[in-house]
Image (spheres, rainbow, N blue to C red):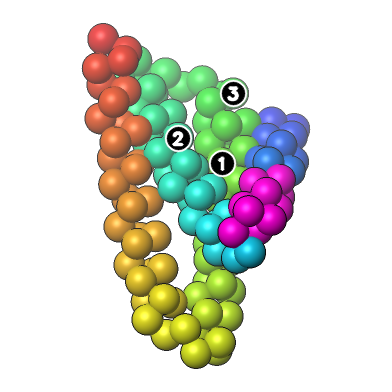
Amino acid sequence: MFLVASGGAVGAMLRFGIGNITKILTQNSFYGTLTVNILGSFLIGYLISIGYIKNLSNEFIRYFLIIGFLGSFTTFSAFSYEVIELYLSRKILLSFLYILFTVTICVVAAYLGMYINKFWLK
């Protein structure tokens, strides 16, 4: 519980910081959510593949980094809210592009994290 809670606190603070920085730079909050979701997806793929490649059952990686840190760092609820916000602001095309781009790039990022790790840990 301590590992999940402390990892979650760190992930939430980092997500909050990145969200604020990107909102200042771009005037839109969805770029921050997109950034953390892509980065988080990559890191989840990378960290999960460590366990597959090295047969690790490391509690720190699983509970602190993956469940705690990355679980709170990435956020589907913010993504959902921002899609609705874009749609209600009559930015319908942008809302659908955001959905398509986020889902596609995050799945590709998770795969790349696992793929890169195959060569990194050999």
Judge whether residue 100 can be spotted in this image. yes
Disc nearest the viewer among 1 and 3: 1
Asked whether the residues under the numbered discs 2 and 1 touch, taking CB atoms below 8 Å apart as contact, a structural biologist would say yes
Q: Main secondary structure of the magenta part?
A: helix
Q: Amino acid at mark 3?
A: Phe
Residue assigned mark 1: 70
Element on which disc 3 rests: helix
- The quadrant the C terminus occupies is top left
Residue 96 drawn at (x, y percent): 37, 76
Residue assigned mark 2: 43
Answer whether residue 25 is magenta in the image: yes
Mark 2 vs 1, N-terminal side: 2
Asked whether the residues under the numbered discs 1 and 3 touch, taking CB atoms below 8 Å apart as contact, a structural biologist would say no
Q: Amino acid at mark 1?
A: Leu
Q: Which residues are magenta?
A: 15-26
Mark 1 vs 3, N-terminal side: 3
Element on which disc 1 rests: helix
Asked whether the residues under the numbered discs 3 and 2 touch, taking CB atoms below 8 Å apart as contact, a structural biologist would say no
Q: Mark 3 and mark 2: span between their CA atoms?
A: 14 Å
Q: Is residue 88 above or below residue 60?
A: below
